[in-house]
Image (cartoon, coloured by chain):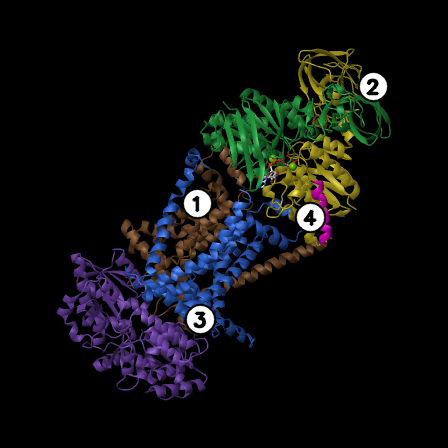
Chain colours: A green, B yellow, C purple, D blue, E brown
Amino acid sequence: MSGVNIQGLSIKFGANEVIKGLDLQVVEGEFLVLLGPSGCGKSTLLHSIAGLIDVSGGRIEIGGQDMTDAEPSERGIGMVFQSYALYPTMTVEKNMSFGLRVAGTPKAEIARRVDKAAQMLQLTPLLQRKPAQLSGGQRQRVAIGRALVREAGVFLFDEPLSNLDAKLRAELRRELKLLHHTLGSTMIYVTHDQVEAMTLASRIVVMKGGVIQQIGTPAEVYERPANLFVAGFLGAPAINLVPARVGADGRTLDGALPLQLAEGRATAGQAVVLGVRPEHIRLQDDGRWRATVELVEPMGNHQVVWMKLGTQGFSALVHDGRRVAAGDVLAFDLDESALSVFDATTETRLD
Amino acid sequence: MSGVNIQGLSIKFGANEVIKGLDLQVVEGEFLVLLGPSGCGKSTLLHSIAGLIDVSGGRIEIGGQDMTDAEPSERGIGMVFQSYALYPTMTVEKNMSFGLRVAGTPKAEIARRVDKAAQMLQLTPLLQRKPAQLSGGQRQRVAIGRALVREAGVFLFDEPLSNLDAKLRAELRRELKLLHHTLGSTMIYVTHDQVEAMTLASRIVVMKGGVIQQIGTPAEVYERPANLFVAGFLGAPAINLVPARVGADGRTLDGALPLQLAEGRATAGQAVVLGVRPEHIRLQDDGRWRATVELVEPMGNHQVVWMKLGTQGFSALVHDGRRVAAGDVLAFDLDESALSVFDATTETRLD
Amino acid sequence: QLKAEVIHWWTSGGESAAAKTLAEAYKAQGGQWVDTAIALGEQARSVAINRIAGGNPPTAAQFNTTQQFRDIVEQGLLNNVDDVAKRDGWDKFLPETVLQAIRVNGHYYAAPVNIHNMSWFWFSKAAFKKAGIAEEPKSFDELFAALDKLKAAGLVPLAHGGQPWQDGIVFTATLAHYGGRDLYLKVFRDRDPKAIMGEDFKKVLLAFKRLQSYTDKGSPGRNWNDATAMLINGRAGVQIMGDWAKGEFAQAKQEAGKDYGCSFGFGPNAPYIVQGDVMVFPKTSKPDQIKAQQLLASVITQPATQVAFSQKKGSIPIRTDVDVSKLDICAQMGVAAMKDKARQLGNGEIYITPDQNGALQDVLTSYWNRNIPVEKVQKDVLSALK
Amino acid sequence: MTSPRRFLKRSAAWFALLPLALIVCVGYVGTVLWTLRTSVSSSRTFPKDDFVGLQQFERLLDNERWQLAIHNLAVYGVLYIAAAMLIGFLLAVFIDQKVRGEGVLRTAFLYPYAMSFVATGLVWQWVLNPDSGLQNAMQQLGWTNFQFDWIVDQDMVIYTVVIAGTWQGAGLVMALMLAGLRGIDEEIWKAARLDGIPAWRVYLSVVLPMMGPTLATVFTLLAVSVVKVFDTVVAMTQGGPGTASDVPAKFIMDHLFGRANLALASAGAVMLLITVLALVAPLAYVRSRQKSQGGH
Amino acid sequence: MAKQRKVTAVWARIGIYAFLLAAAAFFLLPLYVMLTTSFKSMEEIRLGQIFALPSAPSFDAWRAAWSEACTGVSCEGVRGGFWNSVAIAVPSVVLPILLGAVNGYALSWWKPRGGEWLFGILMLGAFIPIQVMIYPLVKLEAALGIYSSLPGIVVVHLVFAMPIMTLLFRNYYAGLPAELFKAARVDGGGFWRIFVQLVLPMSTPMLIVAAIMQITGVWNDYILGLTFAGRENQPMTVQLNNVINTTTGERLYNLNMAATILTSAVPLLVYLISGRWFVRGIAAGAVK
Ligand SMILES: Nc1ncnc2c1ncn2[C@@H]1O[C@H](COP(=O)(O)OP(=O)(O)OP(=O)(O)O)[C@@H](O)[C@H]1O
Ligand SMILES: Nc1ncnc2c1ncn2[C@@H]1O[C@H](COP(=O)(O)OP(=O)(O)OP(=O)(O)O)[C@@H](O)[C@H]1O
Ligand SMILES: [Mg+2]
Ligand SMILES: [Mg+2]
């Protein structure tokens, strides 16, 4: 009913092509998370799905029907705008119920849904306020509430939790997931929060400059990034990238981390980049390499240890409570099975 | 020169008292992070420090001078607004340079500072755009840039990185820290991102409903929360709270986690709540307790394991790559030295 | 009852009272006067024309005794009142100049209401006394002499309202009384290029311009009644203005002959310049409207109505066979003059179209206010009257 | 690229614009065509169906009064628009400073707009008249050198019309500007205060540009009233001294009513329209070019 | 420092009031002359001392202006047309404003094809002197059978108000956050619903400006009412002009001034009470 199928979509602002021939199939009931650097076209994509931007090329199908030129209201969508776009003259309650009133939903049903959303979003005491009298986070919650009450087939969420505190965010994340299960609607969700992406997504789409870089489950995208960009984009602290050159045997690597690759993964003489996630660097006394600690960042439940091996910097995660200090020289090893290898020129993954 | 000293500050919107007799000393050159749930008055506090809101009571000193009624421009502050408040008719460059131009800063100096900020914020290719032609994150960066070029004595940042992707955010975090070091200015920084709070703050202020709950270094606030609210507010996943009653000996606890407290920490018969951070729950075969796994959330570099012991739910962090599945029964133990204990009625910490 | 809706522009106090005499006379003879008063002639006329065009004409509409309604006649949009004119014998008692205006191709298209002379000379006795002038001027040269004396006495010699139509009045007076009847007719009626380019007309123009030199600095834009007030206060000596100025004097409780003097010209043969108001009757085929129109035409022109109206209005009747004893002395002078057909002289607009008149006014007012060589003005007048 | 469905949906907008379309087509296009037609005829009191070519236009262009009127219009237009916008804006800005008695002040600035110019024109005539007005009053107060007699001065009279026009129009400009000012987001103000921008500079560099649409409205409004200016002149100076303060609308009206020359009046209206078109067209062209280049 | 600031603030305040009061003096000067004149006798007025206070103030002129002055055969002052004016003004204010708002909204938010052309022609039409259009409109209304009637005058007001009203609202709406329109469309609001529930409530400042303009325009209109309303519906200004205007009749300036002020009482009242609608920050909190 409400899958979204995008073919060859391209969108221009004047001469500036922001979305470039994008193809994307969103399965019905899927929770798709859009990730990408600031300005890569995520909001633009959502707006085009909602029918709020004229597309310069391509097709958008929703629920199997061509909706490229349909009115936003016909597309059966609920949307949270990145800039909220609250109705300034309406109270919170009116803001949320507007869509339902338009649709002619019975009063009792409107009240029920608004109450439910308000409760979930902790907005109940604020229902009679106008947007100007709300804090940033409260406004954002109203924007979410306005979308949620619609119980639409497709929800488009543009960074809906960005201005909320961690606790509320965690709660809402759970609520959204629940809602997704109960309603069974399709969700397309933009976020910059990787925890959100990892916990919510059934699939993640990583974009860059209007082009999709990789589509996959959270684990796939995180563990087997399709290219250097995706690898570097996901994960905090970022993945450690180590340049190397493949030896004559097609396996041996030189560089900071001399290793043996599996047969056939690279060709002899190829310039490659190794990707090692910080959590795959294990500090162990019998480690093959030794590095000097440069900086330690305590993070509450773990520490990030920044180390240097020759000229190559690394970060590693330390979860046991051990005390590490700058200047320490530590032995470490790594989990070779979790290693990613990229071609240094094409930047794509080698497997 | 530029410490901030707030005494008995109270702010009302109509009948609604949003800040209630707040006292806060911000030492010069400090990096103070404000944390608190949505709508607790963080933005209001920043606005009052900036002189953009009339206070209904109390005093604000900046750099040792009473600035309660001073003009915002006299206070020597730079500010990033939560809502950006960009000048819509000016280009990015003009937005950033406007204040300097008015102040009569030499052209070359303006160009230098703007270029520097634009580079740091990756805005250089966008300098000639108007705000309406920018993405949400780009706008936010312009707002940061506008504050940064001022090189003021006090910087007020209202969730400046909330709409940026993780990678950029990490970079900017580092840049801000660097800037703080080089300029030596005082920073008051609102964020909902605990990583930001932990990595940037020299001290953290936790607020709730216009009242300060705790002030301390990141470690203090995280490890020794002053009350149940602070404990629950910080940390993701949230701290595990386990109600218990102290036995007749004043040490033994009943409830889900029967333990012995240190002498004098609680009194006999007292109702308490134990706070156990998920990372202090260790899955180990010789653990004293056993619980059933309910849900596993993979987080990339770690997993969150939700377990149940009787009726009490727990979460625990698992960093080793071991496979855990719902339904498994696992033995665990905990790090008693890191345990927090709160009075169940006053909700304050017991030490 | 015959209902007649009448559009007119008699809206000020005295004018209203005058209009009321018509309404009452009409009522007394079985009609009902439905009053549509609209201030300012141009406005009232244009409303009348629009209503005619819109198919909702009034029963009667006021026009001036000029060519203003010629176009409507030509469009066949007016009813004639030939029956009334024949029956009442208009030809016998109406002045020739008036007949000239209302009779088109032998048909009578308007009923005259009154006669105004737009070019009276008014004298402030108080000012004259101050300036040591014993007698009111009896010729144009004496007028200039008096003006000079007034000037010498530090008074405003000529009270003038510097508005184009008032400039035009001064010009008309100069042409008629300085240039003389023949030249007047040659210029206006015949539009004779030779006369217009001739020496006599040049002299008229120079005299006209000379009059300007007697005005005060504040005159441009002034309303005529403010100029009259200068006479009333004794600040100014002379004003050239229509007979309605009497109303102002009356308002200030001044009396002709006692406080102010009036003269419509100089010398025993001075022409009397005729203008005035008429009623036209828009085309209608409704019998009772036609009857109403005819009754109105008849009532208006009756002697009693005439006297009553002119008494209030300050004008003179359209006929001389009336009892003038109730009129003021200025009006009586006018009626007396009108009895001599040779002295009747039409106002310029009786001879030329509104368009020509307007163009002439433009030329004159420019000349009055700016320094333009008189030869050029002659040429301009010629082309305005083309 | 709009599909029929989308078109149908947008038809509501079209439907809503139907009355406008009707008014434009019948009321404006219709009358413009009619005027155009009349301007090439020899119509007098009533429209005539003949065709006399551009005769009326030739007469118009030959007419000194018309030329003067156009010249006056230009002078008046520039000064009046500038003065009304400046004063209106200043009044709005000052009234926006949370002053006491805002309502009374606003009414004081706005009331001239409500007054029929028939009477107020007369008052201005008195006030400006050297004998009865300001000059006289000042001289009586001892400033014997005080000279203010523009209204009777051929070369200066048009400026008095500017004064009276501004007096009448500035209040409305103020109201419009006030509405525009109040629409500006408070946060922008806060940002500017923080940047240490002096208030006047904020108004100039931030607020004024943000009020672009309001300014466009005000400007157009004033431009329309400039082209149509008539009452002010008639009530104050009757176009005088002589024809020194004549304006095209007065010229047109004189010929339309008093002089029964419909054709020439129409020609005047057409000329006015052509002038406006000549001024506006390049602007509109540039704007449409800009639009198609940048953004949506 | 704070003290110094307070001092400058006080000076700034003084400056503000000084400017406003000076401006008010300029604006009120003619009113002062009008008022004093209206309380003088004609004798006093003839002296030409326009700034002098009346030596024996009298309300006679006011009473006469309201109920006694002659305006033709009847002498009932300006009050005669009051209710006619009201009857004309109500529909001629409400309809053009509503239509103008709808037009502005449709043009700026929905941008229908050809809309800009329509608007362009309309704006061009605004530059034609009204008087030139009267004759064809008379013919048109006569053909429609509404000439010389209340609907006739309302339609004419509608036609002549259209350019300015549309311009006013079009430009105002163009300045509102476009995001709101998007949100409303996602919410399924159709053309009218968005207009009524979202756009109109945000229009108050412009509605009041439009009302000020339209009430003033219609209430003070003379020539259109005169030509199109029919003699039964003549507005008050016709009486006013009859009281004031005359070429050859006497002019009672005191009465003229009183009549003018009386006639403009309704728009003045509107100005006075319009204040509370000049609201600040109507779109505040809408977008980030
Ligand atoms: N104009 C106003 N009128 C009434 N209440 C207001 C107004 N502005 C803010 N508030 C209330 O004041 C409280 C504090 O607002 P503030 O913006 O300071 O919150 P915050 O801590 O910044 O929240 P967030 O993290 O959501 O931005 C909120 O509960 C808000 O609803
Ligand atoms: N009106 C416009 N004119 C020109 N360029 C625009 C316009 N709107 C957006 N852009 C550009 O299009 C690109 C994509 O914008 P979009 O808002 O989709 O980014 P985004 O992925 O949502 O970014 P963010 O995470 O910062 O919100 C950006 O580089 C932006 O600068
Ligand atoms: Mg975005
Ligand atoms: Mg906030």
Q: State yes or no: Cβ of the residue under disc 4 lies below 8 Å from any atom of ligand 1.
A: no
Viewer-proximal residue, B23 or C63? C63
Same chain, labels 4 and 2: yes
* Circle 2 residue: B263
- Look at the picture and state if B68 lies above or below C61: above
Q: Is the magenta stretch mostly helix, strand or loop?
A: helix
**Spatial separation of the CA atoms under disc 4 and disc 3:** 55 Å
Q: Quadrant of the N terminus of chain C?
A: bottom left
Dot 1 amino acid type = Gly
Dividing the picture into quadrants, the one containing residue B294 is: top right
Would residue A89 be found to the left or right of residue E4 on screen? Answer: left
Question: Marks 3 and 2: CB-CB under 8 Å?
Answer: no
Same chain, labels 3 and 2: no
Residue D244: mark: 3
* Circle 4 residue: B72
Closer to us: mark 4 or mark 3? 3
Judged from the image, the secondary structure of the residue bearing numbered disc 3 is loop
Chain letter of disc 3? D
Chain letter of disc 1? E
**Spatial separation of the CA atoms under disc 4 and disc 2:** 53 Å
Residue shown at the point (68%, 52%) measured from the top left? B101
Viewer-proximal residue, E147 or D174? E147
Judged from the image, the secondary structure of the residue bearing numbered disc 1 is helix
Dot 2 amino acid type = Glu
**Spatial separation of the CA atoms under disc 3 and disc 2:** 106 Å
* Circle 1 residue: E115
Q: State yes or no: Cβ of the residue under disc 1 lies below 8 Å from any atom of ligand 2.
A: no
Closer to us: mark 3 or mark 1? 1
- Asked whether residue D227 is drawn in magenta, I would say no
Closer to us: mark 2 or mark 1? 1
